[in-house]
Amino acid sequence: MRLASFAVIDSLPRVGAVLDTGSGTQVVDLTQPLSEFGVTRMEDLVALDGPAWPAIVEVVADGGVGHLPHHALGSVTLLPSVTAPSQMLFVRANYPQPDGSIPDLQRPAFFSKLPSTMIPDGATVLLPPMASQPDWEGELALIIGRHASFVPREEAMRYVAGYTITNDITARDLQASGESTLAKNFRTFAPLGPWLVTPDEVGDPHDLGIRQWINGTLFQDGNTKDMLFDIPQIIAFLSSITDLHPGDVVATGAPAGTGKHQKPPLFLRDGDTMRVEIDGIGSLNNRATAAPV
């Protein structure tokens, strides 16, 4: 099932089910059935650890949504898959290098992005004037569905509410100068979307193609089966360091094909378009624009 955070004109964030119908793709507003569980945001929904979550899934799966408001996908404003995560944790160096070499890591390496960096599908990535080498990194991201602390690897997948797509925009020149936190955390540097897809629909998250096109040219073309640390390892490790909370975003790393490894290196410029596509999830589309000086 695909679940989207969305808004209609002058409204607060809502949660909807994305369905393909004879009249096109529709977003079904789940506000009414979710209200009895106190759910107003995606984070609230994924946190439900009881009868509510399977009840909502059953209603949507059985087509029992005909009486609910339907909106054409193009008529709503998609929001990031989750709108207010407490944490965004990104795993780095989790795929073989472009030359095929394997990073010498004993455990997952990670960094944080501020939730304020998130933007949805279709929104604009602002290229800051102080960064001359903004780069792209298309990645599979997972959304945590329950409080996780010291989770054993064999139980880790129970903590995944669903999957989405992110594009880890990075200012390579600032990163190279030692300003890694700044390089990752400009506003708009974490596109996330277009929606959350539940594990049952995604299938095996360790066998998903990941592709990214810049201005229509394919640069990243990898598969999650090549991750050096799989999702259970990532969750087990991160939850041994810090508590994970419902709605938290965990990005699993970028396969080869980023701009800094092109010959010569290639970086984002005003007007560039980005499209990240992951099997079983969909595509995340954003345009780069020079930020105001």
Image (cartoon, grey):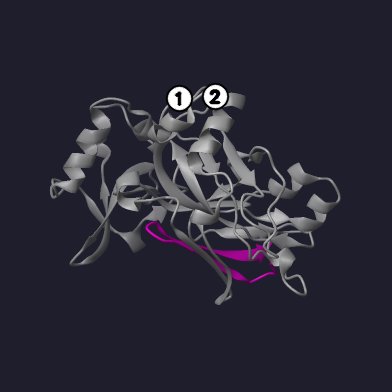
Please state if 265 lies on the left or on the right of 118 as rendered: right
Where residue 280 appears, as percent x and y from the top left, is 37, 58
> Callout 2: few (<14), some (14-19), or many (20+) C-alpha neighbours within 10 Å?
few
- Lateral position of residue 111 relative to residue 73, left or right: right
Q: Quadrant of residue 263?
A: bottom right
Would you place residue 205 above or below residue 32 in this image?
A: below
Q: What kind of element bears circle 1?
A: loop
Reading the image, the residue beneath label 2 is 243
Query: Foreground residue, 42 or 108?
Result: 108
Q: CA distance from mark 1 to mark 2?
A: 7 Å
Q: Main secondary structure of the magenta part?
A: strand
Q: Is residue 1 left or right of residue 61?
A: right
| Residue position marked by numbered label 1 in the rendering | 147
Q: Quadrant of the C terminus?
A: bottom right
Q: Is residue 260 visible?
A: yes
Percent x, y of residue 67: 13, 47
Q: Crowdedness of circle 1 by 10 Å Cα count: few (<14), some, many (20+)?
A: some
Image: magenta residue range: 268-290
Q: Residue furthest right?
A: 177
Residue 161 position in % (x across, y down)? 38, 38
| Residue 279 belongs to magenta span | yes
Label located before the other in sequence (1 or 2): 1
Q: Quadrant of residue 160?
A: top left
- Which amino acid, by three-letter code, is at mark 2? Asp
Magenta segment: does it hold 41? Answer: no
Residues at marks 1 and 2 touching, judged by CB atoms closer than 8 Å = yes
